[in-house]
Image (spheres, coloured by chain):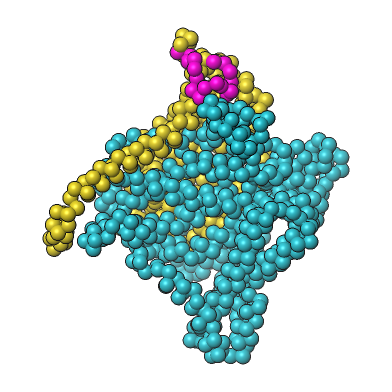
Amino acid sequence: MSHSTSEIRKPRPRMQESPSRGSLYNKVARFILPFQNYPSAIKGSTTYRKVAGILNLPFAGLGSILLGEIEVGLGLFAAYGLLGFLFVYVIQCLSTGFISISGFDAFVVLAIILFGFLSCWYGSFSKNTSDLLRLQKGKKLKGSYLVALFLTTKNNADNFFSRYREQFRISPSRVKSRMIYSWFIMGVGIMFYDHLLKGIFLLAAQILYLSYMIAVGASDLLGLFTLHQEGIASNETMVYGTVALAITVAFVLCYCSSMKTLVDSIELSNEGKRGPGVKGELSLVINEKFYVTGLIVPILGAIAFTVIPIFFMVLVAFTDYTKVDGAGTFPNPLADQYLNWVGFETFFRLFGSAQNLADMLKVFSWTMIWAILATFTCYFGGLFLAMLLNKKSIKGKVIYRSLLVISMALPQFVSLLVMRTLFVNNGPINQLLNDWGWIEWMQNNGWISEYDSFVNFWGTPSLAKTLIILINMWVGIPYYMLLMSGLLINIPKDYYEAATIEGANGRQTFTKITMPYIIYMTAPALITSFVSNINNFNVIWFLTGNADGKADDTDILITWLYKITMKSVPDYNFGAAIGIIMFIVSASVSLIVFHRSNSFKNEEEFR
Amino acid sequence: MANKAVSTVENINRPKKKHSQKAARIWDAIWSNLLVFIITLVWIIPVLWVVSRAFDAQETGYISKTFFPSVWTFQTGDPFVHFRELFTETDFPIWLRNTFIISVINTILTTLVTVLTAFILSRFRFKTRKLIMNVALILGMFPGFMAMIAVYLILNMLGLINSIWSLLLFYVAGAGMGFFTCKGYFDTIGKEIDEAAKLDGASMLRIFFQIFLPLAKPMIIYTALLAFMAPWGDYILAGIVLTSPENQTVAVGLYNWMDSNNINLYFYKFCAGCCIVAIPTVALYISLQRFFISGISAGAIKG
């Protein structure tokens, strides 16, 4: 079987450009290109476009809005404005002494905000410049997606109604009555046109939907707005309401599909043709429409356990869902406790209170440093190890590789809890240090207090952070080692042969061939792993997690979020607000990079 | 041509560098082997430590005068005392059974759903395809467990709280979202084969089961391996949903033993439990390494 597999699979994709072409000079040239083009872009434009181009300089994104690229422009404008405001606000808070965080944290946070701000400006600037140039050449822009969506929907609706009227005019009265009652009863009309199964399905859907709405749905849907359903806890009301909303959306889609099928089949029947029939419908289900059948389970699953929960979480951030101290169940409808919508109050609490803001900036700074360090140490560590194991002179590669994989194969809670125990104050590592006399030596040097006979690994922030990074390397490097060894095998051998002929030494082949190839191939993986490190709960929690509910020095955003949500008096809306901020951070990182990475754009090229 | 060129270059260089080159190669071999040996040792020591503690007869808990036990259970004549206690005195057998049931069913269902989703997104072209892929990408960026409160409420609504089936339901429901790696791999399988089958009148369902699944074997094994591993490591959801001790999975149970209140009581049982848990996962990883490498390389390249 493996033989036939290799025959059918196409060869792996080659690099589309030679590695050396991505040199620094070219990058700089590409970077300053918008600045060079800007004057000519402004000069050749009409007055309106000139104004848009000039307005875009101080207000990034405004130019794109004026040129009709509404969503992109609005997104850039909002990000630019918010980041700029945040930058000024944080500086003001720091300078007036409103919050006090370490200079290093302040530097990291401000640097990241400034970087985001400048990239927004640059992104908007280059987009605006190229848009102006494109307009000068008489080409069209993509335009607003929302407007396009609206126009398409309107076109479809117009089309539908004109066809409906046309068929209504030419049909006999029996068909006319079908066309009328189909507005109220889904599915029955199309049953007459060899759409029996679909008709039964739609009819059943309508009956179920109506009975659901009458029983609980309508009240649930209303509850989403009021959050006040007699006898039902408000948090459950929110979930029920979200479910009702999802069901309603699905029903509307079914309704549209039913009307469209009706007109389609009447049109066919008036032309003297027949519909698919039961057999044809069954064949559709496993053939042309197999994608619908196959995607039902994943889509329903994703809606029930991903979309609805995320929607709920976003909603929670705008309510006053904070547990009251001492209350048993909260919110308790029997004690007349209901939640309320509070708008952006939670966000003001997050940014307006000195304690929360300082905590957030501190945690944010460490989150970013952690994500960067964790990604790069594991990436290059794995590359190094893979190249080392790739050498011809190493004996027993299989054994080494299998032993190294163990730390990754262990469930993370096992490996990480073991590591935590190794480094506790009276644990084995401290015991060893003591036996070897290092503790005494450190005490003599004044590095640890003479009352402590141990190194407080987890209690000293800097030590704990270093250890976290090192232990993460222990867990993560084997994964990258496997990944890299998979890739190293795939580098075309002729590159190396050519390099040998040219007389390149080992370091040159590494920097000019291996490294560019690996980076080109793994750029998406690097970003995915950066984002997943931002959300890396396990390493931080199993190593330093505790139930104090405060933001500790080693906490990253996600463990802080967990502590806030799981502490004895949970602060759900506060946690949800942090969750939204985390989403914005990781989503913008990945969107920017995915947008720029080739392998995501050229999906079809890899075929 | 090329071979000739190489040999001329070597001929010119050989007389001068022969000796030093050989010495350098030997030195290189020595330090590389040494380095790999040391790295592997560092990697393996923590694992050895846990295993050794499972056979420790000192009864001092995690505090010990020596790094490895000074008195072994082999010396006291009852080598597997901690394992026996683990299986007779605690809920561990039940946790193990729960985790195993979830793992096996999850492996089958999750693999099927993931592979089917990837197959559809790789082979069909329909209007909402791009939308579905982009939405899946964006949804994946939300910090998953903030939504755990809502997941808890939904499972509560379905009456599944404190049941292992809730975990299974959640894993399978989320399986469709992890199609990216699989789809990337399927995209590299030529389209000609399924087009030929289509011309011969095979239904898409049949193409999927009879032609595609055998072709995608490495990817299926990779997906199955990950699906099998997930319940062994999942702490967050299992910790929230499974409330009573007899319904827990090993991750939750063993984590609670390492609580500062329990650690002295349960430390040896924890070590023994770790050994038991590690056996299936490590064995699978090592024996299926080949498929794992092809899986992660395909995943990395396509993102």
Residue at 77%, 51% in the rendered image: A355
Q: Nearer the viewer, residue A343 or B33?
A: B33
Residue at 52%, 42% in the rendered image: A470
Residue at 62%, 79% in the rendered image: A57
Q: Please state the extent of the stretch shown in magenta in the rendering.
A: B58-74
Residue at 51%, 78% in the rendered image: A34
Query: Is residue A79 at least partly visible in the picture?
Result: yes
Main secondary structure found in the magenta portion: loop
Picture quadrant where residue A478 is located:
top left
* B66 within the magenta span: yes
Query: Is residue A483 at least partly visible in the picture?
Result: no
Q: Where, quadrant-wise, is the N terminus of chain A in this rendering?
A: top left
* B132 within the magenta span: no
- On the image, the x and y values in percent for residue B54 come to 50, 21
Q: In the picture shown, does residue B174 fall above or below A189?
A: above
Q: In the picture shown, does residue A524 fall above or below B104?
A: below
Q: Nearer the viewer, residue A424 or B93?
A: A424
Residue A223 as seen in the image, left or right of residue B125: right
- On the image, the x and y values in percent for residue A97 come to 78, 58
Q: Where, quadrant-wise, is the C terminus of chain A in this rendering?
A: bottom left
The colour assigned to chain A within the rendered structure? cyan
Residue B171 as seen in the image, left or right of residue B147: left
The colour assigned to chain B within the rendered structure? yellow
Picture quadrant where residue A564 is located:
top right
- On the image, the x and y values in percent for residue A460 come to 64, 40
- On the image, the x and y values in percent for residue A257 come to 57, 61
